[in-house]
DNA sequence: TTGTATGCGTTATCAA
DNA sequence: TTGATAACGCATACAA
């Protein structure tokens, strides 16, 4: 902050442009000059002002991540850390920094673009499909500004990364069928949500392909929390022909269902199998432990970052999209139906 | 990025210094000029370059948070989101931004200071007592650079915020005694760790004040994870005179202990009471649910941010420290000893 | 291989 | 109340 390129130039008896070239390791500066200047920089404890550098180079070396506290509550909350760390792991070695921006404080969704993008604060933006809308995309595109979405976005061509939610639905449902369960209900998620549609589509497809058929009344929609899981499970299990297994939208839903089943004296596994999306935050710690679909959120962040950097470096690249795979972790809650009954 | 203050000046037929004054709402510009210039800024979709502003004002309007992935694993991981959101909640209205920096990538712990502080990237730093050391503090102080630590730091006077860990130890232990338990073991944490010392001190003090006495062999040290909880509980419960309750360093330790007890057929609560630090990530979801000490990490982040901003605004303020209180959440795992036995 | 001059987009200091 | 001009700290085209 104190000592500038000017001071170094004076001390080394060279022009400040020479110092600048040493800073950037220009090949047209003699090795001995470089060594001498560098020595002086060390002695004087010089660190270039990143702000001045950025102004001169017209590049911020900073990428932004935009999120919305109000909308993404319990759901993204637990994954936030992993995503951030994933992003950091790829941008940090490239000398980029990460600036966190929160949508909630913004008056309008477009003002955040002024504040972040137009002001030249960041070189690229990572956001997600919940925040994104066509108007934002149009603005971003008109500015030729690189961005990627975490989460599939379909109404306009943009670059996005997502987990294959349909595949996840197939894996969870298929696993239950393979364990001998045959009447699978699906609990959680709102009809309009894209993530629900995808997951539910995989669930439905698996049932149909297995020749079991799909029943509308086996799907319970709603905000995916413990209460929904509890109420839905109570209702389903007390009905005339209760299902023998659940696919749950997340850990909280699954826990609610678990609670209801235990309260009704329904055996898990055996009478009832429960499988859930997400391993985090507590699938391994319930009683019994839950079979879950592990989503590597570190990798999600890292991939988003890699994609963004690529778009920053090659602005003319067409938008690309990528589906990542998740991993089934089998635990006690879905053990073989017959074995469970023994 | 495209249109600059110069363009506005030309379009409005004024000097760019006038435009600058309008931007900063200077009282010495006539209202009609202001109105006219602002109108033109709207029309031309002008947003000032934050980098140029920062260079001219010599202020980055950015604060940094430094963390270390390698050291802070499962422990801080779950709290990260809340801390960030807490920080954002106070700095965002003040037009500050948050830059995340990861220590892991740095060659030395001091180079991060070069990269972040000397380069003028940030106006203040939030870090924690694990990362901090006397050398860093000395460097920061010699630069008159504002920073605060999340976590108590004692060897040198610095500003810090922390939860009252000793109080936490007292609350958890006192609660167990009040519920009729009398032989309390403490599981988790390394001898050298400050956080362990504080919590353990509260535990010990409570025992002594209750006239129960403190036994060295009732404390099990080690990395606070599920395995430690499991192994320690197995050993303790199978000893000649097993303790009748545990205070655990975190949810993972508590879960391990829970598992061991269930495996040995020890009833919880009743034969054994378990209380744990932290409510997150899964105290309410174990079987039985765990009595826990809730730590409001949002407030921790917010308070750290407020303190930092204050230090930025008033650099001559002496360093201050603050202990926050946590909250006991009573659940089934520590129900009255006799009641539990019925 | 090095130095000179100018620009990056603002703010700030004086004059006018 | 406004304008001209010099910073802010570095990069770069062009000269030397």
Image: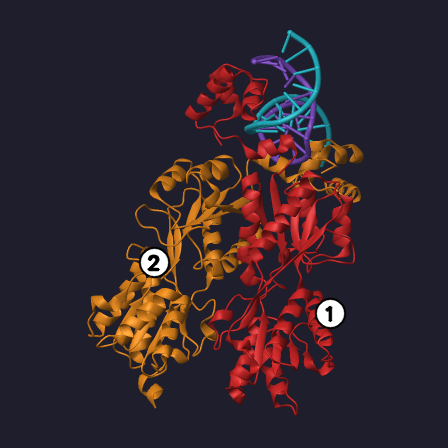
Chain colours: A orange, B red, C cyan, D purple
Residue at mark 2: chain: A
Q: Is residue B168 above or below residue A54?
A: below
Q: Is mark 1 on a helix, strand or loop?
A: loop
Quick check: can you spot residue A97? Answer: no
Q: Dot 2, how many residues are within 10 Å of its Cα: few (below 14), some (14-19), or many (20+)?
A: many
Specify the label residue A203 is tagged with.
none
Q: Name the residue under label 1.
A: B192
Residue A158 locus on image (x, y percent): 36, 47
Q: Is residue B293 left or right of residue B151?
A: left
Quick check: can you spot residue B182? Answer: yes
Q: Is mark 2 on a helix, strand or loop?
A: helix
Q: Dot 1, how many residues are within 10 Å of its Cα: few (below 14), some (14-19), or many (20+)?
A: few
Q: Quadrant of the C terminus of chain A?
A: bottom left
Q: Name the residue under label 2.
A: A195
Residue A136 locus on image (x, y percent): 38, 41
Write the residue at 52% across / 82% down: B339
Write the residue at 66% across / 75% down: B222
Residue at mark 1: chain: B
The answer to which image quadrant residue A180 occupies is: bottom left
Residue A202 locus on image (x, y percent): 29, 65
């Amino acid at each position: 902050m104190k000592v500038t390129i000017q001071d170094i130039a004076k001390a080394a008896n060279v022009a400040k442009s020479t110092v600048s070239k040493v800073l950037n390791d220009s090949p047209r500066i003699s090795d001995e000059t470089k060594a001498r200047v560098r020595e002086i920089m060390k002695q004087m404890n010089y660190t270039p002002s990143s702000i001045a550098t950025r102004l001169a180079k017209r590049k911020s070396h900073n990428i932004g991540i935009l999120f919305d506290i109000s909308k993404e509550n319990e759901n993204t909350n637990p994954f936030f850390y992993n995503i951030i760390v994933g992003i950091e792991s790829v941008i940090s070695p490239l000398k980029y920094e990460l600036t966190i921006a929160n949508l909630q404080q913004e008056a309008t969704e477009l003002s955040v673009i002024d504040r972040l993008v137009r002001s030249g604060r960041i070189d690229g933006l990572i956001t997600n499909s919940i925040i994104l809308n066509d108007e934002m995309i149009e603005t971003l595109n008109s500015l030729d500004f690189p961005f990627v979405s975490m989460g599939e976005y379909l109404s306009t061509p943009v670059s996005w990364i997502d987990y294959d939610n349909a595949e996840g639905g197939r894996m969870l449902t298929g696993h239950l069928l393979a364990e001998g369960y045959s009447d699978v209900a699906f609990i959680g998620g709102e009809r309009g949500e894209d993530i629900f549609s995808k997951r539910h589509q995989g669930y439905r497809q698996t049932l149909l392909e297995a020749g079991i058929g799909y029943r509308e009344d086996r799907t319970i929609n709603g905000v995916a929390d413990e209460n929904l899981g509890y109420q839905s499970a109570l209702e389903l299990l007390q009905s005339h022909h209760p299902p023998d297994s659940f696919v749950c939208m997340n850990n909280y839903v699954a826990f609610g269902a678990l609670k209801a089943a235990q309260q009704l004296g329904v055996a898990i596994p055996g009478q009832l199998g429960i499988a859930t999306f997400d391993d985090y935050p507590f699938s391994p710690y319930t009683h019994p432990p839950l079979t879950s679909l592990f989503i590597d959120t570190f990798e999600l962040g890292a991939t988003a970052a890699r994609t963004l950097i690529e778009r920053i470096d090659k602005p003319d690249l067409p938008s690309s999209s990528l589906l990542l795979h998740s991993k089934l972790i089998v635990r006690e809650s879905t053990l073989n139906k017959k074995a469970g009954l023994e």
